[in-house]
Amino acid sequence: MTVTESQRQQMSNSSSITEFLLLAFADTRELQLLHFWLFLGIYLAALLANGLIITAIACDHRLHTPMYFFLLNLSLLDLGSISTTVPKAMANSLWDDRAISYLGCAAQVFLFLFFMSAEFYLLTIMAYDHYVAICKPLHYGTLLGSRACVHMAAAAWGTGFLYALLHTTNTFSLPLCHSNAVGQFFCEIPHILKLSCSNAYLREVGLTVLSVLVVFICFVFMVLSYVQIFRAVLRIPSEQGCHKAFSTCLPHLAVVSLFLITAIFAYLKPPSISSPPLDLVLAVLYSVVPPAVNPLIYSMRNQELKDALWKLAQLTLFYSQ
């Protein structure tokens, strides 16, 4: 068989794939239902918590500041990312089904990359916001005016869109002929690349390496920002001011660390240590846990947000009577 015929056969096999089979969480019906109820609880908690934060920030004029504007965008991205993967996983567990259509898989890859990459860029911007607020408070209004905040948020969303479009287009242009079984509970690029029967997958590897470099640059920027922040905080004579600064920055650092470490390890770990249980745990840690715990982390030690949420709850009770 000539090279041309071989490539034609590969493309034929790829075009014949109309659906993918996702990884099942369990084989027994009882464990499938347990997974459904567990994910349902996490999903509803994420919807409620992020929805409350969005509503509180939008309705309370005292929270119309750059920090809360970025937090509102973070909650929107969290809602989008967890809604891309968890509902389909719940439906598959409830109906004992593993199938996802080819277009559905491509849409899932695109939306997940879009929301997660935009969230990482937004977390980088939030680190800059904290740096300016603590280290250059006199210039805060100039450096982070309303127009600058809108432009930075738009840049995070736009960059995430382009990043997702590039990776999704490249991944699904590859001929797939090994199988249609994706070894993950949602469509994830590393597992789709394993199905490729062409050396063209090296293009996606190159894009992934480039992405890692961008992520590394953003991470270095965040680390340098927090080094300057902690140096400034340690010079604050007021214990209350020092406590407020740490309570603002440490949750952000915890969110970034959880998201970044698990995501990078999931995408760059060597094949020799790859296994379905490990891949599953890592995917849950970077795709399901952050959207659910971000609202708790950001509101737990934020008195202004607590007051806004309490005021919102009082108004809801008042109008419901």
Image (cartoon, rainbow, N blue to C red):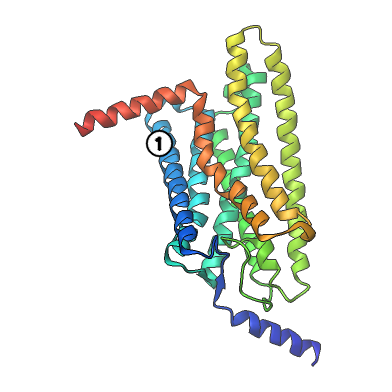
Question: Vertical placement of 241 versus 260: above or below?
Answer: above
| 204 with respect to 103 (left or right) | right
- How packed mark 1 is, by other alpha carbons closer than 10 Å (few <14, some 14-19, many 20 or more), is some
Res. 69 visible in picture: no
Q: Residue visible at 63% across and 70% down?
A: 172
Quadrant (top left/top right/bottom left/bottom right) for the C terminus: top left
Where does residue 65 sit, x and y in percent of width and height?
50, 27
**Which image quadrant for residue 165?**
bottom right
| 210 with respect to 241 (left or right) | right
Res. 58 visible in picture: yes
Q: What residue type is labelled 1?
A: Leu
Question: Vertical placement of 283 versus 247: above or below?
Answer: below
Where does residue 1 sit, x and y in percent of width and height?
79, 93
Extreme residue toward the top, this view: 237
**Which image quadrant for residue 162?**
bottom right
Closer to us: 250 or 114 = 250
Q: How many marks?
A: 1
| 289 with respect to 263 (left or right) | left
Where does residue 102 sit, x and y in percent of width and height?
55, 72
Q: Residue visible at 48% across and 53% down?
A: 83
| 296 with respect to 7 (left or right) | left
Q: Residue visible at 53% across and 43% down?
A: 291
Where does residue 295 sit, x and y in percent of width and height?
50, 35
Closer to us: 125 or 296 = 296
Q: Residue visible at 43% across and 52% down?
A: 37
Closer to us: 39 or 124 = 39
Extreme residue toward the left, this view: 321
Q: What element carries label 1?
A: helix
Return the residue at label 1: 52
